[in-house]
Image (spheres, rainbow, N blue to C red):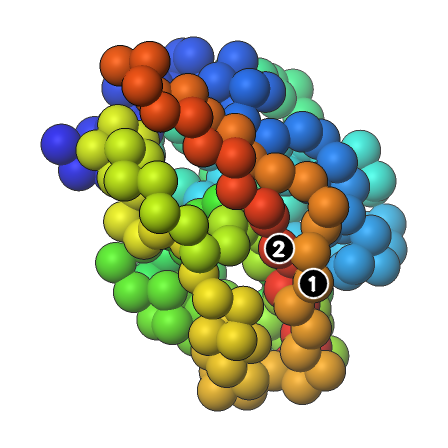
Amino acid sequence: MSSKQYFDEVAPQWDKMRESFFPEAVREKAISVACVQPGKLAADIGAGTGFMTEGLIQRGLRVIAVDQSEAMVAELRRKFEGVDTIDYRIGKAESLPVEDEGIDYVFANMLLHHVDSPPGAIEEMVRILKPGGMLVVTDLDEHDFEFLKTEHRDRWMGFKREDIKRWLTEAGLKGVRVECIGESCCAQSSCGDGYASISIFVASGEK
């Protein structure tokens, strides 16, 4: 099963699953790092059912929500029916259906460990940023919990922070910072014989 197939399958339950994985404090930290301003345009890459999107529209931003899973985007549309500040798009992180240099803030929460090429996805996110725009990535530190690859279709077992910093810098961002959020992502193996608790980082940089 591919990552896309996995997320198509779990889309109806994803909000409940996400609550057990990591708290809303992750979203609050990401948004605070970006210093968002109402009326600006943000992109939520790997939007899922709208965890980041929800926090952004609550703060008065317009959002382009991108996900490769049609089922996830359908759940997102259903949840925010009647909200006219969200633009829904189907697409992969490595080839975003978004024009060059049109976005004020780009967010990617728990996306990179599912993509084929994390550096390629970062380059794409930087491409769509306006000069002076901010990229904020929240994801997992490097870990050794193998069951996440088989049960949750994780492509990567987290990341070294120095790699994340290098990828953002090489993509053309300045003022790159990678910090610990102070929260963890937790998951119980479906077999009951494994439990993961992984620290979460927030990485940011300005174009």
Q: Residues within 10 Å of mark 1 (few under 14, many from 20)?
A: few
Residue at 35% from the left image edge and 47% from the top image edge:
144
- Which numbered tag is attached to residue 153? none
Query: Looking at the picture, which amino acid does disc 1 mark?
Result: Glu
In percent of width and height, residue 32 lies at 82, 52
Compared across the picture, whether 147 is left or right of 200 comes to left
Return the residue at label 1. 179
Q: Earlier in the sequence, mark 2 or mark 1?
A: 1
Query: Please, is residue 55 above or below residue 34 in the view?
Result: above
- Which numbered tag is attached to residue 201? 2
Q: Quadrant of the C terminus?
A: bottom right
Between the residue at mark 2 and the residue at mark 1, the CA separation in whole angstroms equals: 5 Å
Q: Nearer the viewer, residue 126 or 2?
A: 2
In percent of width and height, residue 171 lies at 49, 82
- Asked if the residues shown at circle 2 and circle 1 are in contact, with their CB atoms under 8 angstroms apart, the answer is yes
Residue at 64% from the left image edge and 45% from the top image edge:
63
Q: Quadrant of the N terminus?
A: top left
